[in-house]
Amino acid sequence: MICEILSRLLALCAIACVARAGSTLQDARDFEEKVSILLKEESETPKCFAEGRKDFTCFWEEDEERAGSVDQYSFTYTYQNENSSRCPLRAVPTAGGKMLFVCHLNRIPMFVQMDIQVHREGILIHNRSLLIELVFLLDPPANVTVSSTGQQGQLNVTWVPPPLKYMDDSMMYEVFYSLADSHIGKVEVARARSEYILRGLQSSRKYKVQVRVKLDGVSYNGYWSAWSDPVFMETLPAEFDPLIISLTLIISFIFIVLCLAMLLSHHRFLIKKIWPAIPTPDSKFQGLFTIYGGNFQEWLGQTNGSLWLTPAFIYSEECPSPLEVLSELSLCPSMPSPPLPPKASRALSAVRNEGRELRNGLEERALLVRDNLDGKTDGERAAPHHHLLLDRLRALHQHQVPCSQSSLLESQDTYVTLSANNNSDDERVDRNLEEALPLEAPFPSGNTALCESHSDLGSAPQSSGSGCISSQSSFEYPNHAWMAKGPGYTYMAVADSGVSMDYSPMSRVDENGKVPVYTNEYKNAIPAHRKPFLVRQYPVHDDG
Amino acid sequence: MGNRRTYGPNREDPVRGYADAAMEFPRLLALLLLVLDWTQPGLSSPLRPICDLRVLNHFIQEARDAEGAMKSCREGCGLSQSVTVPQTTVDFDVWEKKNALEQAQEVQTGLWLLQQSLNTLQTSVTNTAMHSHIDNTIRNLLSINAVLRSLNIQEFTPPANATDLEGTWRVSLATELLQVHVNFLRGKVHLLLSSAQACKPDVS
């Protein structure tokens, strides 16, 4: 039993020793920390600080090599109007090869001047006068607590002030706060209170908070204490402010309404840009796709091709006449022709091209031919033939479709001349022809009645011995207007209706005087204003 | 009843009765009391306690300014004679052992001594700049007395032989005098005001 008691006592002693050692160790650490602070802050020697109402410490530092033993030094202090006293010193070695000589006093009268003198072997080495209440170096505030205030971006920091009576109202604090992962922070000052609310913090972030204390310097003064141990705390997450949400919704709604209004006011423009309309030919061909289902021939027959064909250009099939197409005049400047079916367009283009090539040559020759014809007795002999032609033309002209109009003469129509050729006159005609032939030699001749009508000036397409009705007259005309030159010229306008005549010789003519007529109607569109084209006649073999 | 007027039979002119004549004196008395109350000098109600120590801090700052000015003064800034000043030493253990009354008396005695010393300094100093500081310091001492009165601290007049009492020092330099003045304000006066019962919240 005694052994048990002894063992328990030993255990208790061991615990006490450990606790004391721990506190001593902590005190030592605190002392070292304060020493380091004072070594930085205070310039006078010895450096003194008061930790409370009953703890006053003075020390000075010397190199370990030059420092003597503690006995060599004496620390003497004298209060005002009092006798001096000595303070026992102790030597404390520090890291870095330094030696500290420390004086500690427990009784410290304040508000009275204190004179300190340090002697080493009788020699004054340090001297200082101070007021103890002006050199306070307190411990950092204890129990620093950081909590949430319940509001966004705020933290409440509370601490326990140093336990110094009569000095609570004279203390000032600094609160340092920063993000947990940052070293840059802000410092806030609080006077004579033990809590502070941090504002303007970021939401859902971890913050580090530290506090230190110092006396305000009016009645008491001192140095800033060390920073307290950091305390970490996370702020509240961001909340949706109903006011901000409602304002955001209202503004977005107004924006959407404005966009819709703008779109609706410019919808036509936008549709045209985004979804342009593909042009269709419906507007040009009324009823073609709706009634006739795209059958152009039917539509053309029903509507008479009203858009493309003018009555003036249509000659009925019942107007046959012995015609020889000599040339084509292009009185009007070339006009854009509407689209034609492929065959007709190709034919017209071919004729057009050939006509242009031969135009220039024909002009000069036509003039010569005319002059030749006019100035010759043969021409005089040919005059009665001309009169006969005129009569026939007049007679035929009366049977013409009334649709022929004078305006035809201004268009690019085919102009033909009629010449009466009797068999008896053939030789004369031939002679005339031969006289004029050299000028017209370039023109093809042959058995085949391949008569080509050329544009512009008409020259006589010849074919020796063939059945082309030669024209004994040629003509010239100005570029723009075609005017009758007189009785010497016989003109007749023929619509470009695609009529192809059988230009066989007169022997081909029936006894009745009828000339077989072959017609080829172009059912496709025929341009109202056509360019000169070369109508290629079908070869007709004349066995007559 | 006393105010009822008695009308005559003709109801033409009111007839003053006996009751009306009897009310004349109380009315005059009431009127006189009212007038006297307005014209009465002095405070009719107790002072509000001045518990804000910033007032004392202001006085301490001005005392420091005076001390600094005196340290830089070269001529005409000396005491003609040594004066008695209160001791400024504060031993917290000793201070706490004293009761409130003793503390108050000690403070008031010290203030009285300082006032006497500053008056002597004022007559000794010839520097005009220091005169303003000393005058300001004397006024501040009177204001501190007023603050003590506001805290319901019983006014104490030291005896004539206060200069011989314990707890006093003799100083002969003007700088020492002003230094003592500053230390006294920062020490004992500050302790007294900070622990004044009138400023403590009521403990129920």
Image (cartoon, grey):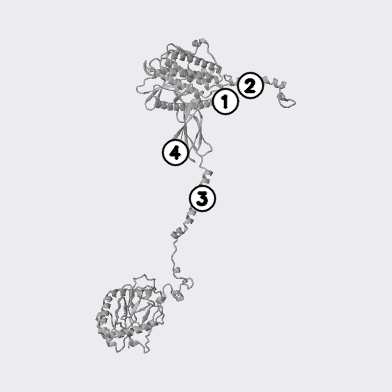
Marks 4 and 1 close (CB-CB < 8 Å)? no
Residue A495 in picture, x, y percent from top left: 38, 77
**Screen quadrant of the C terminus of chain A:** bottom left
Asked whether the residues under marks 1 and 3 belong to the same chain, the reply is no
Q: Mark 3 — residue?
A: A253
Residue at mark 3 shares a chain with residue at mark 2 = no
Task: Give whichever of discs 3 and 4 has the lower sequence position.
Answer: 4
A175, above or below A347, in the image: above
Q: Which mark is residue B31?
A: 2
- The residue that label 1 is drawn on is B201
Mark 3, secondary structure of its residue: helix
Estimate the x, y position of residue A360 in percent, counting from the top left.
28, 74
Q: Chain of mark 4?
A: A
* Foreground pick, A497 / A48: A497
| Rendering coords of residue A443 (x, y %) | 28, 79
- Discs 2 and 4 share one subunit: no
SS for tag 1?
A: loop
Chain at tag 2 = B
Q: Residues within 10 Å of mark 1 (few under 14, many from 20)?
A: few
Indicate the secondary structure of the residue bearing disc 2.
Answer: helix
Q: Amino acid at mark 4?
A: Asp
Q: CA distance from mark 3 to mark 4?
A: 41 Å
| Sequence order check, earlier mark of 2 and 1 | 2
Measured in 3D between alpha carbons, the distance from the residue under mark 2 to the one under mark 1, in whole angstroms, is 41 Å
Name the residue beneath numbered marker 4: A181
